[in-house]
Image (tube, rainbow, N blue to C red):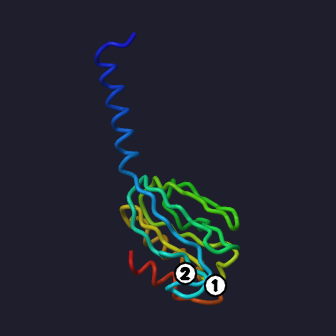
C-alpha cells in the first residue's frame, strides 16, 4: 500500500534516474596503429567529459586494447582491462584524471588521458607518471604533453 507521498517519491526517483541517463553522453576513442599524434595512438588522446559519461574504445586497428593504468585513476574508481582487438565501453563515475594504455604497446607510449569534471588527482597522477613513463622506449614526452592539457 503506497500513500501519496511514497508515490511522489518513486516518481521523483524515476525521473531523476531517467534524466541522468538521458544527459550522459557516449564518447568514442579509436585505437590506431597510426594517427594525428604518430604511431600507436588513441584518437582523440585526451578527453574532458562529465561524470556518468561513457567512453567507447573502438578497436579500429587490431592488436590493441584499452586498460586503466594502476595508480593513475581517481580513488574509488573502477579499473578496466579491455580484451585485445575488442571494443570496450567504460562508464566513468568518479571525478578526476584517468590515464589508460594499450597494454601490448605501452612501451611505445600508447596512452591516453580522460578528465572527468575535475583534475583533483592530477598531482598524484603526475607523480606516478614519473615512474610509469620510464617503461616507454619511444615517445617519452607523450604522456607529459597530454597531462599538460588538463
Q: Which mark is residue 22?
A: none
Name the residue located 41 percent from the left edge and 56 percent from the top edge. 25
Q: Quadrant of the C terminus?
A: bottom left
Q: Which residue is labeled 1 in the image?
A: 108
Res 4 quadrant in image: top left
Within 10 Å of disc 2 (Cα), the crowding (few <14, some 14-19, many 20+) is few
Q: What residue is shown at x 62% (from left), y 66% (from top)?
A: 67
What is the x, y in percent for residue 5? 29, 19
- Badge 1 local density, few (<14 within 10 Å), some, or many (20+)? many
Residue 130, numbered label: 2
Q: Is residue 141 left or right of residue 66?
A: left
Residue toward you, 31 or 133: 31
The residue shown at (34%, 38%) is: 16
Helix, strand or loop for disc 1: helix
Report helix, strand or loop for mark 2. helix
**In the rendered image, which quarter contains the N terminus?**
top left
Could you tell which of marks 1 and 2 lies nearer the N-terminus? Answer: 1
Vertical comparison of 109 with 27: above or below: below
Can you say whether 78 is above or below 61 in the image? above
Residue farthest along the top direction in this orientation: 1
Could you say which quadrant of the image residue 18 lies in? Answer: top left
In percent of width and height, residue 89 lies at: 56, 57
Q: Give coordinates of residue 8: x percent, y percent.
A: 30, 23
Report the number of numbered marks. 2
Amino acid at each position: 500500500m503506497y500513500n501519496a507521498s511514497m508515490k511522489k517519491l518513486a516518481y521523483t526517483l524515476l525521473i531523476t534516474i531517467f534524466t541522468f541517463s538521458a544527459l550522459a553522453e557516449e564518447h568514442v576513442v579509436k585505437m590506431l596503429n597510426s594517427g594525428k599524434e604518430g604511431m600507436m595512438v588513441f584518437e582523440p588522446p585526451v578527453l574532458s567529459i562529465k561524470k556518468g559519461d561513457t567512453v567507447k574504445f573502438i578497436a579500429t586497428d587490431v592488436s590493441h586494447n584499452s586498460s586503466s593504468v594502476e595508480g593513475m585513476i581517481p580513488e574509488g574508481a573502477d579499473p578496466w582491462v579491455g580484451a585485445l582487438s575488442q571494443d570496450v565501453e567504460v562508464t566513468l563515475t568518479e571525478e578526476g584524471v584517468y590515464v589508460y594504455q594499450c597494454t601490448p604497446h605501452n612501451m611505445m607510449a600508447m596512452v591516453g588521458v580522460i578528465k572527468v569534471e575535475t583534475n583533483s588527482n592530477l598531482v598524484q597522477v603526475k607523480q606516478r607518471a614519473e615512474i610509469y613513463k620510464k617503461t616507454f622506449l619511444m615517445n617519452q614526452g607523450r604522456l607529459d604533453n597530454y597531462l599538460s592539457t588538463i
